[in-house]
Image: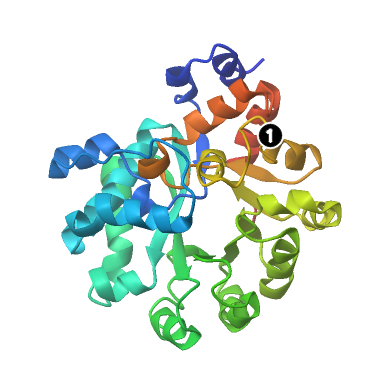
Amino acid sequence: MSDFITALKQRNLEKIKLYPKSDLHNHFVLGGSRRYLHQITGAEINPIKKPLSSMNEMHAWNQANIGQTFEGTKMRKELIRATFQQAKEDGVTVLEIGEDVWGLGEFFHNNIDELVEAFTTAQREIAPDIELRLQIGLSRHCPIDYLEDCLSHFWGNKAFYSIDLYGDELAQPIENFKGIYRRAKKEGLRLKAHVGEWGTAEDVRRAVEELELDEVQHGIAAINDESVVRFIADHHIRLNITPTSNLLLGRVESMSKHPIGRLYRSGVDVTINSDDILIFDSDVSKEYLHLYESGCLTAEELDNIRISGLKPLY
């Protein structure tokens, strides 16, 4: 029996934090250490107390708690540093985070080297043992020509590992992003997108097919169609799942019934991730413990998922 399994069975959160884990679905603006940010700003950033009824409520929380406090380049860099501090404390050894393309002009003076340096400097100074996988972020609501213009600064920069599409799944058809994703594939980026949290199982399949995705952020709606589950498993599409976020956004009924258990047992490659720690108050170690305590997954299954998430996929 591995020491990680023992820590889970003992329900010892501090011991769970000691073992290497990946966090492949973390929005750094909301993914940092609450204590670190309080020390920097004096601001009390309190997590939500009850499940939200809509994404609009989440945006309202964001505006009230992050909003003007973290405007400007200096504070943006502090959010990045806070995320590395949080990951270090949580035992995360592989961290995938990045900036939305609009942030290049908003916070980094359209200087791609300044943006990259903000992440790499924070990693080097706070958590040098963490493997940083730097991501390019796209907001789904933005016009395609605007995104293409922003991306012109990113293409060709070898510092980036992946590209991710997020935001309102219904904002515009997934097919609109095919050109961007074809270019990203040529650039050698790993292709990811948020889909199947609010949409359907068929939305998951269509996104994978149209954008040639390697990984899906969330993807839990796939469980509603066995053919889509088989499609994902057969094509080795990884689902980077955030259980507490799904629960507190009303996407699942309970932790014990979270579809990650059935997806894993159906042969789907799943990982366990934090999403937005400042809102949902659940880091990766807590996610593992919650899934174990609820009976959704066994300690042995969770250890297998943990180990798989640490392995490079190409």
Q: How many marks?
A: 1
The x, y position of residue 231, in whole percent, is 82, 58
Q: What is the three-letter code of the residue carrying label 1? A: Lys
Left or right of 248 in this view: 306? right
Residue 203, image quadrant: bottom right
Residue wearing tag 1: 257
Vertical relation: 258 (above or below) 225: above
Vertical relation: 228 (above or below) 259: below
Q: Which residue is the extreme one toward the top?
A: 10
Q: Which residue is the extreme one toward the front?
A: 53
The x, y position of residue 190, in whole percent, is 58, 63
Secondary structure of residue under mark 1 = loop
The x, y position of residue 30, in whole percent, is 36, 49
Q: Residues within 10 Å of mark 1 (few under 14, many from 20)?
A: some
Viewer-nearest residue: 244 or 275: 244
Q: Residue at x 18, y 54 (%)?
A: 69
Left or right of 94 in this view: 223? right
